[in-house]
Each structure stands twice: as structure tokens, then as C-alpha cells.
Image: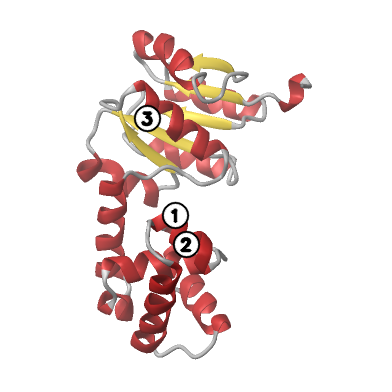
Amino acid sequence: MSETLLPRILLADDHGLIRDALPSAIRRRVPRAQFECVGTAADTIAAVMRREWSLVVLDLGLPGGTELETLRHVRELRPALPILVFSMFPEAKMGVAAIEAGASGYLCKTADRATIGAAVAETLAGEGYRSVRLRELLAKRARERHGEAAALSRRELEVLIELGRGRSNKEIAAGLGVSVTSVGTYRTRIMEKLGLRTTADLLRYVVEHRLLRE
């Protein structure tokens, strides 16, 4: 494998023990990953500007920045760069805010090694990582923010978002652990509740209401 194809991961955390421990946990799922470590907001921004990265694993509140300031700055500099927040804050406190600020995924530092590896692998694959709890929080936030979408159940909102990502009923069923028939039923209910008639209407609704940020 060419060196240019190896995943390059920037680990941004001000605790040396965490910077030392993360590579071994990540290599359980991404064995050929290459790492660089930084410990401040300024060094994180400098590293992001200096080269291309496959992923940034970012702590919140690095020295020299506020809790979300560095995250927002990285997102502005590299709009397509996957960012996995790895934070001491529980999801209920900062998870939704981090996703809304541009994080691709959110993981608490209480996670075990297997979960850390899985979260990194999923984020590298473009899926982002959200625990079941964080998905619930994001769905609740979406219902609070988005007009007619408040009429949708949590499951219906999840299906709507997945449909907006262009996923098939079969893919959604596998991801949510439900039957393909159930996904079809949810889709019908969504269309009825939102007054939509076509798939194009559904996709337009998702984009206009910025549901893909959830």
C-alpha cells in the first residue's frame, strides 16, 4: 500500500496519556494508520493548515481555545475533513452542540478500546459516529427545531434523515435493525404527516430544513 493511501490521523488532546494510548486502540480497527499528536488549539490549527488529514480526533477545550472554538475553526478551514470529537463531557452536555458545530461524530472518553476503534473506523468510512443515546438527543433536538417534523416519531425522523442521505429501504432497515416492510411503512407515514407527494419533495424537505446536520 502506498504511503499516500495510509490513513493519516491527527490526535489533538492536551493529555499526554491519552495521546499515547489512542494509537493502539485505533490500530485495532485501522492497523496501518499513521499518527501525529498535538496538544493545543494553535498547534491543531497549524497542523490542519500544513497538510491533508484523513481524520482529526479532537478534544474539546484545548489550551488556547474555548470548548467549541477549535472545532469550528477546523471545520471552516477543511469543510470536508472528518472530525471525531473525543471528550470528557457526556453526550447530554456537549454532544448535540459539537455535532451542530461541525463534528462528524462524538465519543466520550469513558468509551472502551473496542468502541474507540469502531468510532474511528466508522468516521473514516464517512459514516460519522453517534451512539444510540446521541441519536436520541439529536432526534429530540430536531423535533424541537423543525416545524412539521415535530409531528414525526423518533423512528420516523431517523428514517427521514436516512432517506435524505439517499439510502435505500434495505440499507435503512439494516442500519436501524428493522424490517424493509417497516421502513416502507415509516416512509408512507412521513409523507402523509409532512404533506409530501414525491421522493423529490422528500429530499427537498430534508435539505431545506437542514436535517442532514443532525
Residue 201 drawn above or below residue 75: below
Tag in front: 1 or 3: 1
Crowd tier of the residue under label 2, counting other residues whose Cα lies within 10 Å: few below 14, some 14–19, many 20 or above: many
Amino acid type, label 2? Ile
Amino acid type, label 3? Thr
Q: CA distance from mark 1 to mark 3?
A: 17 Å
Residue at 32% over, 29% down: 61
**Residue topped by disc 3:** 115
Crowd tier of the residue under label 3, counting other residues whose Cα lies within 10 Å: few below 14, some 14–19, many 20 or above: some
Crowd tier of the residue under label 1, counting other residues whose Cα lies within 10 Å: few below 14, some 14–19, many 20 or above: few
Amino acid type, label 1? Gly
The answer to whether marks 1 and 2 mark residues whose Cβ atoms lie closer than 8 Å is yes
Write down the quadrant of residue 87 in the picture.
Answer: top left
- Front-most of residues 139 and 168: 168
Residue at 38% over, 72% down: 182
**Residue topped by disc 2:** 172
The quadrant of the picture occupied by the C terminus is: bottom left
User: Which of the two labelled residues, at mark 1 and mark 3, occupies the earlier sequence position?
Assistant: 3
Is any part of residue 58 visible from this angle? yes
Residue 22 drawn above or below residue 128: above
